Amino acid sequence: MKDESQRLFTAIALPDEHKKKLRHWVEQDLNHLSFRKWSDFRDYHVTLQFLGDVETSVIPKLEQALVHAAAEHRPFTLGMGEAGFFGREDFPRVLWRGVTGQRESLDQLHQSILRATEPLGFKPEERPYRPHITVARSYTGGEPVSASMWQSNDRSGEPWEVGEFVLYATRMGQKPMYQIIQTFPLMR
């Protein structure tokens, strides 16, 4: 009998206040843009490591490794940065908001998670780590996105303290699509 699996990733969940501010920005400033998929505001997060399909039997070992990674770090602050994109500027593949604040602490947490999960067979992505908050995917509009879209805006909000990260499971077709499986407090 084949072991069941879940599609998992580690991330920093945005506080509810920041999710609401980001949703307001999307509804106020972006309602004229046409994307195939808009992220549900309850799913806004900063990915740390995508783990892929993980057999259920491996999850307890994974959680133990993540507890050890979390114990190496103390809380730090992040903020929401400016809008950006992956793909072509005028027809973006992904629309996102950047991450500001104590980025070095974020990068160190990312590296600790990679080191903790590697002995369990999880491989880091080959592309460089570019922390962001995905807002929408696959621009389908007929007209190019205006360059003014990528200019500064004042809706980044106050920084927040990151005191934990989470292990999310993806639930395709559901809203919200991501479900927290476990929370890992930063300890040091």
Image: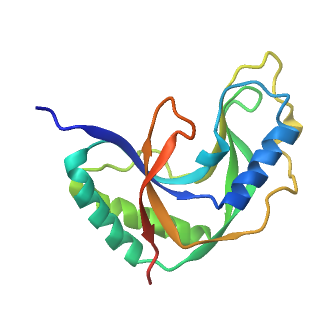
Please determine whether, in this image, residue 139 is positioned above or below residue 118.
Answer: above
Outermost residue to the left: 1
Q: In this view, does 90 lie to the left or right of 108?
A: right
Q: Which residue is at a point 34% across and 65% down the rendered structure image?
A: 66
Q: In this view, does 35 lie to the left or right of 177?
A: right
Please tell me how many numbered marks the rendered image carries. 0
Q: Where is residue 102 in the image (x, y as percent from the top left)?
A: 63, 72
Please determine whether, in this image, residue 68 is positioned above or below residue 117.
Answer: below
Q: Where is residue 61 in the image (x, y as percent from the top left)?
A: 23, 60
In front: 1, or 111? 1
- Occupied quadrant, residue 39: top right
Q: Which residue is at a point 82% across and 39% down the rendered structure image?
A: 27
Q: Quadrant of the N terminus?
A: top left
Q: Quadrant of the C terminus?
A: bottom left
Q: Where is residue 143 in the image (x, y as percent from the top left)?
A: 83, 19
Q: Position of residue 160 (x, y in %)?
A: 68, 70
Let me know if residue 185 appears in the view.
yes
Please determine whether, in this image, residue 71 is positioned above or below residue 143.
Answer: below
Outermost residue to the front: 175
In front: 28, or 134? 28
Please determine whether, in this image, residue 188 is positioned above or below residue 149.
Answer: below
Q: Is residue 156 left or right of residue 133?
A: right
Q: Which residue is at a point 77% across and 68% down the rendered structure image?
A: 158
In front: 15, or 77? 15
- Occupied quadrant, residue 55: top left
Let me know if residue 82 appears in the view.
no
Outermost residue to the top: 142
Q: Is residue 71 left or right of residue 89?
A: left
